[in-house]
Amino acid sequence: MKKINLLVGLTVIISLMIISSCNNENEKTIVKAKKIALEDFFKNPDKTSYQISPDGNYFSYMAPYEKRMNVFIQKRGQDSVIQLTSETDRNIAGYFWPNNDQILYLKDNGGDENYKIYIVNIDGSDPKCLTDFDGVRSMIIDDLPDNPDEVIISMNKRNPQVFDPYRLNLTDGSLELLAENPGNIQSWLFDHDGKLRVATAIVDGINSALLYRETEKDPWQTILTTNFKESFSPQFFTFDNKNLIGSSNIGRDKSAIIRFNLSEGKEDTVLYENPDYDVNSVSYSQKRKVLTSASFTSWKRERHFFDKETENIYKFLEDTLKGYEIAITGENKAEDIFIVRTYSDKSLGAYYIYDKNASTIEKITDVSPWLDENEMANQLSIEYKSRDGLTIHGYLTLPKGYTMETAENLPVVVNPHGGPWARDSWGFNPELQFLANRGFAVLQMNFRGSTGYGRKFWESSFKKWGQEMQNDVTDGTKWLIEKGITNPNRIAVYGGSYGGYATLQALVKEPDLYAAGVDYVGVSNLFTFMKTIPPYWEPYLAMMHEMVGDPSNKQDSIMMRENSPVFNVD
């Protein structure tokens, strides 16, 4: 249903823009790409979610069976395929290899999101449910790579409102409750020996706490408390299990990868930071026990390497698979066989198997072979100044054949992203490609509040819905006009969620700037939005009041009414 509504919105934009151009006699003829059927842009891949077995002998993937995504495996070097699951009511939500002989997978019932964990042998025999509890949601939180017979899961079995961690035995299906969540624990972290020693908790809707214990027999101690504007996000233990590796913006504007000293309760070493962007992701080698890389997003994903061996692997892949971004999505236990995914702004790419020892790369499948990337449009990185001098980064997708130098008088769709505390990124986007294929340029902007640009940029959005945040959208539109890229009479605005709100606000504040607009599940009333916070957001309500506005506060109430589109329609 979501995809259907999305497609309706896109086709409405095109229809409205065609109507708006009927009297535009001075429009130059647009060079059109080969017209591609709408459904081809949004078609699901035939095969996806490739993984490799721990011993590297098999690869697995998800593919449709009876219109539902199921799990299949194939032995390397052989053509025969084994179908492991035959679900016809719901898609498999996800899966992984706990050992060489079995697959674990998750599936809910009729879309209730109460996922159950199933296990099946790799020959398709003995399928069974390991968490067969009604109304209970199960999630895998640690695959315990050094223990092939157990995994750590979380379930709301004891109390529907909170999730407790359990150790699940894959041999006999037994469950061991490891801790009882008092109600405020947001995440659990296990050391490399599978011991539960760290947790993060929400304190009062504004503050968060880091809890630690030396052993599983010791009581929990709070060793760090932070305001929601500052945070330390632990990702894993150091290899001696004494300290933590994670990302932190405590005392700095941009998040950095740091080592956190558990005995002292504070950061002791900065491992990597970037002056311009948040660095939130770090990877390591399970086999060699070394940090391998940290990654961040500028206009596209970038990596900093800690480890020469990993750097050489990526260099080999990039040199061999030129013109594409590289992502290693899986590896065997020996770390010499890898699943590699390529992609670009014009292609969903392909999956490959890379054998490091043999220095060979074998293509497994193209993700969307029915799309010719030569007919696709480029997604260009751009930046402009908002009216208060703030630099706004974004992307401009131009129809095939156009460049920044030759683009002139084009119809444009302005597409603010949802969130709003998220961001647009570079890569294949079916919406952008469909619109570009129909002759439209598409402007995306990471307006203030978008993530990845540091704390100051993020905080500059607080209580600024419909105000400075909206100015960033408006000023991006006017930048296109000033550059001569767009026909000022043929500009549409379209977005979902917060992007839908920004669409409505754009039509309210700048009715003469946009010829058409389509709101997809956007907020129209900030009071209603704050009163209908989902139950799982309740612990964060105080934070939302600080970020959006507090309806019970007189000054905030005035601001919220002034910036709710529903109250300001002429």
Image: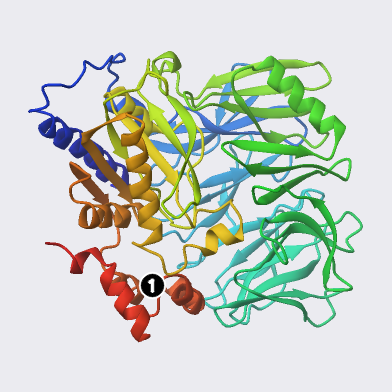
Q: Position of residue 519 (x, y in %)?
A: 25, 51
Image quarter for residue 352?
top right
Query: As displayed, is residue 435 above or below residue 451?
Result: above
Q: Pinpoint residue 493: horizontal percent, then vertical percent.
A: 27, 44
Horizontal side, residue 180 vs residue 557: left or right: right
Outermost residue to the left: 23
Q: Residue at x 73, y 64 (%)?
A: 189
Residue 22 on image: x %, y %: 8, 28
| Residue farthest toward the right in the current orientation of the protein | 240
Q: Is residue 65 visible?
A: yes
Residue at 50% from the left image edge and 52% from the top image edge: 390
Query: Looking at this view, is 210 or 177 the one in front?
Result: 210
Where residue 516 sits, quadrant-wise, is: top left
Q: Circle 1: is it few (<14), some (14-19), or many (20+) Cα within 10 Å?
A: few
* Quadrant for the C terminus in the image: bottom left
Query: On the picture, is 263 further left or further right than 293?
Result: right
Q: How is the image coloured?
A: rainbow
Q: Position of residue 567 (x, y in %)?
A: 19, 69
Q: Camera-side residue: 219 or 449?
A: 449
196 lies above or below 294: below
The residue type indicated by label 1 comes to Ile
Left/right of residue 12 with respect to residue 249 in the rendered view? left
Helix, strand or loop under label 1: loop
Q: Which residue is mark 1?
A: 533
Q: Is residue 132 visible?
A: no
